[in-house]
Every structure is written in structure tokens, then in C-alpha cells.
Amino acid sequence: MEFRTELITDSQTIKGVRFPAHIGFRQLLITGPPGAGKSTLIRKLGGWSEEGYVDLSLNKWWTAQALSLRPREIHLGFPCTGFKDALAVFDDEWVRSLTPPELDLTRIRIPPMKRFVFSINWRDRYAFEFLIPRAEALFDQRANRARFGTHPVDESITIEQVRNQLTIYRLAAHYLHRQGLIVYIREGTEGDLLRIVALDNDKPD
């Protein structure tokens, strides 16, 4: 899955890590597939050490307690075609599926627009950083971890699985961006910061 991106040049440095200039430290939610470097970034930032989980198909997921402490690493639960419950890419149902689960965009819940002066602007409360490295680099990282046995999620990992997981995260990033949430992409922990470029026909659903 491809979409247009452009380099973010207006940046700031927070605790030695570059971020977009318009992002606040307490907005940060860092997500991405296993091995992408989420924990590494959180440690550098001194952020909340425990991993969070958000099921994007749940109503009012944006009010979840897991999101109240930021910056934080979060795993996403994706609604997928043919599956009743949302799946993380490391869930057994995902890993054992004979064909890659397909993201069901129609079941992703989106925070409401701010309607009143004193109401919470949920779409501006969070800034989603999607860590999306190159597939080959991510596969090498996870294969290396598998040799040491430190991360069970990397057992029997294949380059095809890595590509499928990256595709799901890219689709989710694009969709959340289209719906008006703050989203940007980092190409690996040392990679460029990218914004998704809205196309003329890229209107919210």
C-alpha cells in the first residue's frame, strides 16, 4: 500500500530525538509493528514505560485509561474482515491465519469533532507517530532477536509476515490522517520524519 509523503523539515529536538515542530511532548503516542523501535524511543524520551493497548474498533477508545499517560508506546488492535474481535499483529489468530487479515476500515471508530468551546478536542489531544521502517531492515532486526529468544513474537517470522504487518500499519496511519487526527511517520528510529500528503480526492469518509 503506497501513499504520498513528504519530508518534515520544521522539527524540534526533545531529549535528543527529533520530532515535528508542532507536536507537544505530552501528545505523543508511538506505535508500529513489533521490532520497529517503539520501546527504544520511549526509553530515550523517559516516557511511560508500560506498553498500552488500544482497540480501534471500540467506541470511545480515545478515552481509554491507557492513553492518559504520555508519551507512551501503544499497540493497536485492528478490526479485520471475518474476525469478530480486533486483532493485534502478534495475536495467535493473526499469526495462524492462512491469508493475511484485511483491515476493515468501516469498523474503525473516530473521535468526534470539537463542537463546543469547553468540550475536549479529542482529535488534537494525541499525536500518533507510526514507526514504519523498511521491511528488509525490520525483518533483519526481528530475525536477530529470534536467535536470542528474547521476544517470542519473533519466532518463525518471515519477510512476508513483516510486509503484511507494515501494510496494516500504513493503512491505519493513512486512514486516521484522512479522518483529521494528527499522524506522522518515522522511517525507523533513526529515519526521516514524514507527513502524509493529502491528495485532492483524499476526503474523510
Image (cartoon, rainbow, N blue to C red):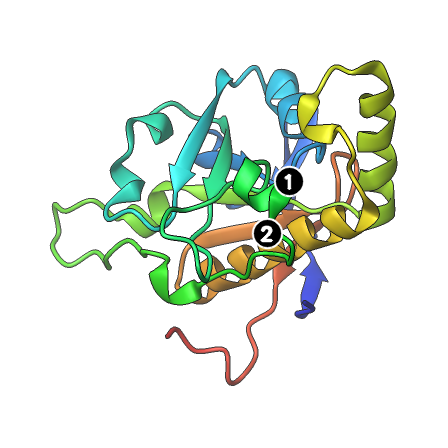
Instruction: Label 2: state its secondary structure.
Output: helix
Between 163 and 14, the residue placed more toward the observer is 163
Between 113 and 87, the residue placed more toward the observer is 87
Amino acid residing under circle 1: Pro
Location of mark 1 (residue): 33
Q: Quadrant of the C terminus?
A: bottom left
Viewer can see residue 97 = yes
74 relative to 33 in the view: left or right: left
User: Taking 55 as reference, is 66 above or below it?
Assistant: above
**Looking at the image, do the residues carrying marks 1 and 2 touch, with CB atoms under 8 Å apart?**
yes
User: Taking 198 as reference, is 33 above or below it?
Assistant: above
x and y, in percent, of residue 127 in the image: 46, 43
Q: Residue at x 38, y 23 (%)?
A: 69
Location of mark 2 (residue): 169
Amino acid residing under circle 2: Tyr
Residue at mark 1 to residue at mark 2: CA–CA distance = 7 Å
Between 98 and 91, the residue placed more toward the observer is 98
